[in-house]
Amino acid sequence: MLALRDCIDMCDLTEQEVAAIAEEENLPPIVAVMVGCSLLRSQRGLERMRGMLRNRAQRAVARGDHAGAAAHQRTYEDFRRRCPQPLHD
């Protein structure tokens, strides 16, 4: 049986990225992995993913969670660096 960690690793996502998808889309983490894997494969999907990560950082700022906002901003910046173009099979 595959664990959540195995699925995350197979899709080139980080735990923080999966958490952002799950939070934004109100999904269980395992479903968020599948959604994220799909998003990585198109320019539109990458833009949507960037928006989710950016929104997460902005929500943390709005609630006064500056440490969380900084962590979410790092996740956003790391994602932009790591995934400038869609993945291809």
Image (cartoon, rainbow, N blue to C red):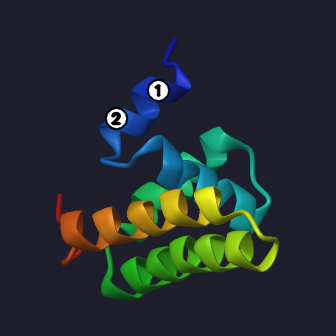
At which x and y percent is residue 20?
61, 59
In the rendered image, residue 70, in percent from the top left (x then y), is placed at 51, 64
Q: Position of residue 26 (x, y in %)?
A: 80, 60
- Secondary structure of the residue carrying numbered label 1: helix
Q: 5 above or below 21? A: above
Cα distance in 3D space between marks 1 and 2: 6 Å
Q: Give percent across and percent down for residue 49.
A: 48, 74
Identify the residue at the far top of this view: 1
Residue pointed to by mark 2: 9
Question: How many numbered dots are placed on residues in this image?
Answer: 2
Q: Nearer the viewer, residue 73 or 27?
A: 73
Q: Is residue 8 left or right of residue 80?
A: right
Determine the image quadrant of residue 35: bottom right
Left or right side of 67 for 17: left
Label 2, residues with CA under 10 Å away: few <14, some 14-19, many ≥20: few
- Residue at 38% across / 78% down in the picture? 46
Horizontal relation, residue 28 to residue 2: left or right:
right
- Answer with left or right where residue 10 lies relative to residue 88: right
Q: Amino acid at mark 2?
A: Asp
Given the image, on which type of amino acid does mark 1 rest? Arg
Q: Quadrant of the C terminus?
A: bottom left
Comparing 9 with 64, the one in front is: 64
**Residue shown at the point (49%, 18%) measured from the top left:** 2
SS for tag 2? Answer: helix
Callouts 1 and 2 close, C-beta under 8 Å: yes
Task: Report the residue at 17% width, 65% height from top.
Answer: 88
Q: Which residue is mark 1?
A: 5
